[in-house]
Image (cartoon, rainbow, N blue to C red):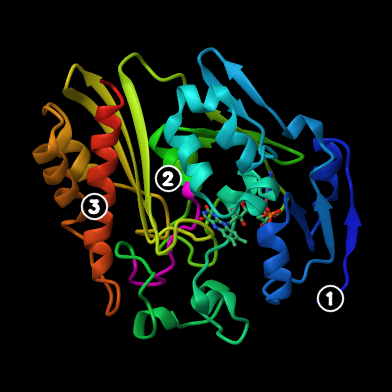
Amino acid sequence: MRSFEWSDPPTIEDALAQLRPGAVAKAGGVDLSDRLKERLDAPARLVNLRRIPALDGVRDAGGGLELGPLVTLARLADHPLVVQRFPAVAEAARRAATPNVRNQATVGGNLLQRPRCWYFRQADFPCRRKGGDTCFALEGRNQYHAVFANDLCAIVHPSDLATALVAHGAEVDVRSRSRARRLALEALYVLPDEDVTREHRVAPDELLVGIRLPAPAPGVRGAYVKIGERDSADWPIASAAAVLALDGAICRRATLVLGAAAPVPWRAREAEGALEGRRVDAAAAADAARAALAKARPLSENRYKVAVLEAALRRAILAAAGSAA
Ligand SMILES: Cc1cc2nc3c(=O)[nH]c(=O)nc-3n(C[C@H](O)[C@H](O)[C@H](O)COP(=O)(O)OP(=O)(O)OC[C@H]3O[C@@H](n4cnc5c(N)ncnc54)[C@H](O)[C@@H]3O)c2cc1C
C-alpha cells in the first residue's frame, strides 16, 4: 500500500477545500480500505469525514426524513423514525453485511461503494471499468453478474440500501466548493453505456452531504426482500423493493426496484404498469414479477438469477401489500 496524507477537517467547507486532485473522501473506510489493499486506489490524501457533525444525524422533515451521509447502517436499521416510516429502508440496512461492518459503514459510503465484480477487484485484470478494453465477466465467470444492461460491463450495483431508497423516491444533496445540487438518487447512478468507468455522478471534488426521503402519502407501504447465499455477511444475489400506494387492496401506484440485477438499481417499469389498478394478490404479484424479468438477458452462468429476482420481487410486493392490512 502506498503511503498517503491524512486529514480530519471539522467542517464540510474544510473538507471540500481539501478534495484537491489525488485526494479521496473517507467515511467509515470499509470499502476504501479494501480498495487500497487491492491496489485499485492509491490516493495521495485521505480526507476523513467522520469529524464533521453536519454530515451526521437523522432528522424529521415534515413526515419525511433527512439522513446525514455519516449515519451508520446500524443506526439507520434501528432508528425508530426509519423503522416506523420506511420499514423497507430499515430492513435493507439491517440485512446488509455483518453487525461489525454495519457499526462502521455509513449510508453515504454504502451508496457510493464500488462494485464487487471479482475481475474489477483484482488489479491483475485490466477490465473496462478500470480503463481497459475487455469485460472479463462476459466470457468468464459471471454467476453473480447482471441480467440487464450487461453488454459492455456486467457488474451489479452492490448497495442494498440504494434499492430501497430509490423505491421510496429518495433525493440526494451534492456539494462542491462552487455549487450545490439536488437530484433523485435514481439519477445519481450511471449506466455503462454512458460511462463504463464510473458508477455515480459525485465528482472527485464533491461530497454527498444529505439524503432526503419524502413523506410517504397515506396508504403508501414499502417492503424490501433480499435473497443471498448466506443470511449475513454477503451482498445480495437478488433483491427487490416494492413501494405501493394502496387503496384498500387495490394498487394505485407502484414503484418497484430490483437489486443485484443491473449496474444500477433497476426500476421494473413493466411490472409497475402490470400492478397498477389491480387487486394485489398472489396472482397479480406473480404477473408483475414475470413482467419485470421478461426482458432479462442472462449470461452463461447466471440464468438462475432470473427466477431468484422474480421470487424476490413477488415476495416484496406481497409483503408491502400485507403490511397495509
Ligand atoms: C464483509 C462485508 C459484507 C458486506 N455486505 C454488504 C451487503 O450485504 N450489502 C451492502 O449493501 N453492502 C455490503 N457491504 C459493503 C459495505 O456496506 C460498504 O463497504 C460500506 O457501507 C461503505 O461505507 P463506508 O462508510 O465504509 O464507506 P467508505 O469506504 O469510507 O467510502 C466508500 C466510497 O464512498 C465515498 N464516500 C463516502 N462518503 C462520501 C460522501 N459523503 N461524499 C462523497 N463520497 C463519499 C468514498 O470516497 C469511497 O469512494 C459489505 C462489506 C463487507 C466488508
Q: CA distance from mark 1 to mark 2?
A: 34 Å
Q: Is residue 169 visible?
A: no
| Residue density around tag 3, few if under 14, some if 14–19, many if 20 or more, within 10 Å | many
Give whichever of discs 3 and 1 has the lower sequence position: 1
Q: Is residue 172 left or right of residue 72?
A: left
Instruction: Report the residue marked by disc 3.
Output: 311
Which span is picked out in magenta? Answer: 150-160
Residue 304 occupies which quadrant of the picture? Answer: bottom left
Q: Residue at x 66, y 41 (%)?
A: 72
Kindly identify which residue carries mark 2. Answer: 163
Disc ID at residue 2:
1
Distance from mark 2 CB to nearest ligand 1 atom below 8 Å: no
Question: Can residue 222 be found in the magenta stretch?
Answer: no
> Residue 307: x percent and y percent?
21, 60
Please tell me which residue lies in front, 41 or 20.
Answer: 41
At horizontal 56% and vertical 83% (from top left) the residue drawn is: 126
How far apart in space, not on screen, are marks 3 and 2 (Cα)?
Answer: 16 Å
Is residue 324 left or right of 33 when viewed as pictured?
left
What type is the residue that disc 1 sits on?
Arg
Element type at mark 2: helix
Residue occupying image coordinates x 85% and y 35%: 11
3 or 1: mark nearer the eye? 3
Magenta residues: mostly which secondary structure?
A: loop
Label 1 close to label 2 by CB (< 8 Å): no
| Mark 3–mark 1 distance (CA, rounded to whole Å) | 45 Å
Quadrant location, the C terminus: top left
Residue 257's disc is: none
Residue type at mark 3: give it.
Ala
Label 1, secondary structure: give it: loop
Q: Position of residue 48 (x, y in %)?
A: 82, 50
